[in-house]
Amino acid sequence: MASLSVRIDLGPEFRIGPGKIELLEKIAAFGSISAAGRAMDMSYRRAWELVEELNGTFESPVVSAQTGGKRGGGAVLTPFGLSLVARYRAIESAATQAAAAHLDALQSELAAKPTAAE
């Protein structure tokens, strides 16, 4: 099935796409940058670098790290971070809907591949 992947260029130095959005969604789900990274087979260092990049790109932070506590702290999406994810998903949905007929047409043009049973 043909699908569309959206990457938004917000200037020459910064892009946001499915990987960063998935990381943010996992941080929201797990409450932890390290757990989000593990869920994506990503090192904690790489996940932290992406969060720092996101936080440094916008006027408002995207992720807020929480230190201390019984479980050693964690991380949450800020209101802006939640808005960023929602906006990205809305753009992705609109683009997919707009491209649906073209994606279907491309899919129908694929050459049929014989299966192992044939």
Image (tube, rainbow, N blue to C red):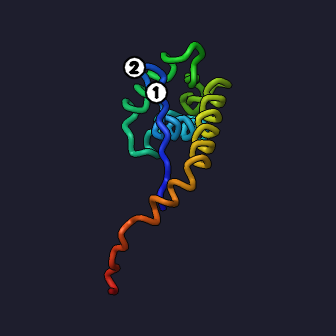
- Helix, strand or loop at mark 1: strand
Q: Amino acid at mark 1?
A: Asp
What residue does disc 1 label? 9
Asked if residue 43 shows in the view, the reply is yes
Residue 15: x %, y % from top left: 44, 28
Whether 10 is drawn above or below 105: the answer is above
Between 83 and 92, the residue placed more toward the observer is 92
Q: Is residue 35 visible?
A: no
Q: Is residue 106 left or right of residue 73?
A: left
State the image coordinates of residue 78 (x, y, percent, origin top left). 64, 25
Q: Which residue is identified by label 2? A: 12
Residue found 52% across the figure and 54% down from its top: 102
Going 46% across and 62% down the picture, which residue do you hit?
A: 107
Q: Amino acid at mark 2?
A: Pro
User: Residue furthest toward the bottom?
Assistant: 118
SS at badge 2 = loop
Give the quarter of the image for residue 26.
top right
Q: Residue furthest top?
A: 59
- The residue closer to the viewer here, 23 or 95, is 95
**Cβ–Cβ below 8 Å for labels 2 and 1?**
yes
Say the numbered circle drawn on residue 76. none
Above or below, 72 relative to 4: above
Answer left or right for 74 relative to 47.
right
Q: Quadrant of the C terminus?
A: bottom left
Q: List x then y, in percent, for residue 62.
A: 57, 24
Q: Residue at x 50, y 55 (%)?
A: 103
- Residue in the picture at 44% in, 45% down: 40
Number of numbered callouts drawn? 2
